[in-house]
Every structure is written in C-alpha cells, then in structure tokens.
Image (cartoon, rainbow, N blue to C red):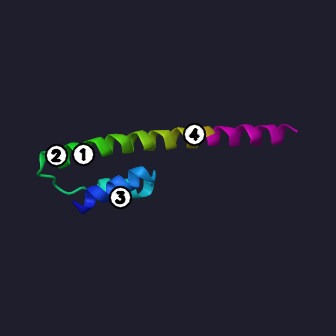
Amino acid sequence: MRWLNSLKISVINNDINNIGKLINEMPNITELAEAKEALALIKEAITIVDMEKQNTLNTLNKIKQTKAFLESS
C-alpha cells in the first residue's frame, strides 16, 4: 500500500508535517497485517511528535530565559 510506505518514510525521516498530512488522509485498511503495521507506525509517529513538542517547549523556555536576562541587564 502506497500510503503505508509513505508513512514509513515519514516516520524514518521524522517528517512531522508529512506524518500529520498522511494521518489526516488515512485510507480504510482492510488487511489485518497492514492495520497492525499502520498502528505501530502511528504509535511511533506519536512518540516523534511528543519528542518534538518537548524540544520546542525547551527551546521556548530558553528563549524566555535569555530574553529575561537581556532585559534585566
């Protein structure tokens, strides 16, 4: 299935934008093996998105700290 291959590539490349797009366009999966593979990939995608969210939050906090430091100087 082309969609499943695209999702695999996006997960491997940590391509969050494409992962979101693919999940929004998820087709009906009728075969059990494909459904299990899709589920595993979606779980991995969630992990990737959560890690990126945490990285973004950490960066935002560093920026806020730097801004506070610069404003106090």
Q: Quadrant of residue 50?
A: top left
Residue 72 place in picture, x, y as percent: 84, 37
Secondary element under disc 4, as helix, strand or loop, is helix
Question: Mark 1 or mark 3, which has the lower sequence index?
Answer: 3
Secondary element under disc 2, as helix, strand or loop, is helix
Kindly check if marks 4 and 3 are in contact, taking CB atoms under 8 A apart as contact: no
Disc 2 marks a residue whose amino acid type is Ala
- Measure how far apart labels 4 and 1 are at the Cα level: 30 Å
Return the residue found at the far bottom. Answer: 2
Kindly check if marks 2 and 1 are in contact, taking CB atoms under 8 A apart as contact: yes
Q: Is residue 65 left or right of residue 45?
A: right
Disc 1 marks a residue whose amino acid type is Glu
Residue 46 place in picture, x, y as percent: 38, 41
Q: Which residue is mark 1?
A: 37
- Measure how far apart labels 4 and 3 are at the Cα level: 22 Å
Q: Which mark is residue 57?
A: 4
Q: Which residue is mark 3?
A: 21
Disc 4 marks a residue whose amino acid type is Leu
Q: Which residue is mark 2?
A: 33
- Measure how far apart labels 2 and 1 are at the Cα level: 6 Å
Disc 3 marks a residue whose amino acid type is Lys
Q: Which residues are magenta?
A: 59-73
- Measure how far apart labels 1 and 3 are at the Cα level: 18 Å
Question: Mark 4 or mark 3, which has the lower sequence index?
Answer: 3
Q: Nearer the viewer, residue 72 or 32?
A: 32
